[in-house]
């Protein structure tokens, strides 16, 4: 039986959770604004950071993010690991209390 622990995924998840939120925009908790931000196209720069911030903010809303389920499911196709991770987290936390 292989008992080797693979630390890389655990380290990546820890880093993503501990990553500081950056950006000049004031954080909002309005799901409609966050959905619009999450759906903004773009591969880099402020658009990417905006999607990351929106996914994180939605994950912090918990059940209040239920109105964003469709946008979060679409965000699972995002190529960015942080957007994907926070979208998965937001989906889990938004659906757990429904």
Image (cartoon, helix red, strand yellow):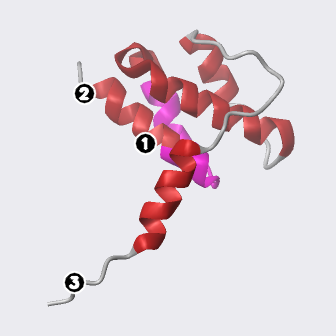
Q: Which residues are magenta?
A: 69-85
Judge whether residue 25 can be spotted in this image.
Answer: yes
Q: Residues within 10 Å of mark 3 (few under 14, many from 20)?
A: few
Q: Quadrant of residue 31?
A: top right
| Element carrying mark 3 | loop
Name the front one of labels 2 and 3: 3
The answer to whether the residues at label 1 and label 3 have Cβ atoms under 8 Å apart is no
Q: Nearer the viewer, residue 6 or 79?
A: 6
Q: Is residue 7 magenta?
A: no
What is the residue that sits farthest to the top in this orientation?
Answer: 30
In the image, is residue 6 above or below residue 81? below
Q: Residue at x 53, y 30 (%)?
A: 71
Q: Residue at x 45, y 66 (%)?
A: 9
Q: Residues within 10 Å of mark 1 (few under 14, many from 20)?
A: some
Label of residue 88 in the image: 1
Q: Earlier in the sequence, mark 2 or mark 1?
A: 1
On the image, numbered disc 3 is attached to which residue?
Answer: 3
Q: Is residue 71 magenta?
A: yes
In the image, is residue 23 above or below residue 19? above
On the image, numbered disc 2 is attached to which residue?
Answer: 96
**Image quarter of the N terminus:** bottom left
In the image, is residue 34 above or below residue 79? above
């Amino acid at each position: 039986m292989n008992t080797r622990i693979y630390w890389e995924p655990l380290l990546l998840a820890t880093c993503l959770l501990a990553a500081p939120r950056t950006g000049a925009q004031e954080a909002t908790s309005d799901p409609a604004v966050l959905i619009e931000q999450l759906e903004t196209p773009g591969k880099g720069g402020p658009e990417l950071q905006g999607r990351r911030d929106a996914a994180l903010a939605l994950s912090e809303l918990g059940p209040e993010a239920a109105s964003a389920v469709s946008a979060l499911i679409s965000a699972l196709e995002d190529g960015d690991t942080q957007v994907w991770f926070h979208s998965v987290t937001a989906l889990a936390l938004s659906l757990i209390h429904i």
